[in-house]
Image (spheres, rainbow, N blue to C red):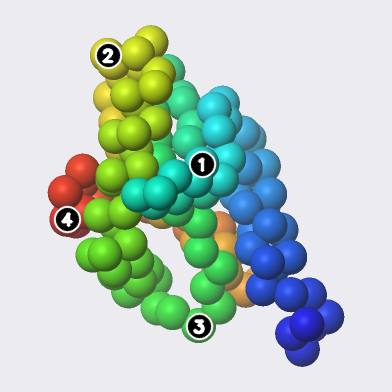
Amino acid sequence: MTRAGLSTTQKGARGEEAAVSYLESKGWIVLARNFRTRVGEIDIIARHGDIVAFVEVKSWHSVPREDLARSVGPRKRARIARAARLYLSRRPELADAHLRFDLVFLGGEENGIVHIAGAFNEEGID
């Protein structure tokens, strides 16, 4: 347990739930949560019109806004991209969708939720 009484896993689950609520309030339809494979994991896969976003969720309390997009390193980005390719190989109906890799950050009271659309590309580069 952490100082606040919640384990890291519990905090992560609450963060993902908040991110899902946020995305749904913006009109996104969640296709999958916690998509895990041997090549990587994706926190949330969501669709809005013809866009499919692979979303990494982070809880962040003291990172300046301009540093948020760099807080997910190249190895993590590459693992997310590999997992996304695997997900798409199983979902041929999404072949014509526009793909995007987003980050959703949940900060303290002053930060709220920051959604960075298109934070990096399929090669893990921003």
Amino acid type at image mark 4: Ile
Most extreme residue toward the top is 93
State whether residue 76 is above or below residue 86. Answer: below
The first of marks 2 and 4 along the sequence is: 2
State the residue in front, 100 or 107. 100
Q: Amino acid at mark 1?
A: Phe
Q: How many angstroms separate mark 2 from mark 3 (CA)?
A: 39 Å
Query: Real-space Cα distance between discs 3 and 4?
Result: 24 Å
Between 89 and 125, the one lying in front of the other is 89
Nearer to us in this view, 92 or 53: 92
Which amino acid, by three-letter code, is at mark 3?
Ser
Task: Label 2: state its secondary structure.
Answer: loop
Q: Which residue is mark 4?
A: 125
Task: Give how far across and how far down residue 4 sits, in percent.
Answer: 79, 83
Which mark, residue 54?
A: none
Q: Earlier in the sequence, mark 2 or mark 3?
A: 3
In the image, what residue type sits under mark 2? Answer: Asp
Tell me the number on the disc at residue 96.
2
Report the residue at 78% width, 82% height from top: 1
Mark 1 and mark 3: Cα distance apart in space: 28 Å
Mark 1 or mark 2, which is nearer to you? 1
Seen at 61% across and 33% down, the residue is 24
Mark 4, secondary structure of its residue: loop
Left or right of 28, for residue 103: left
Instruction: Choose the circle earlier in sequence order: 1 or 3.
Output: 1
Residue at figure coordinates x 40%, y 18% from the top left: 91
Can I make out residue 55 in this image? no
Identify the mark nearer the N-term, 1 or 2: 1
Query: Residue at (39%, 31%) from the top-left corner?
Result: 87
Task: Farthest residue to the front: give it.
Answer: 38
* Label pair 3/4, CB-CB below 8 angstroms: no
Q: Quick check: 22 above or below 50?
A: below
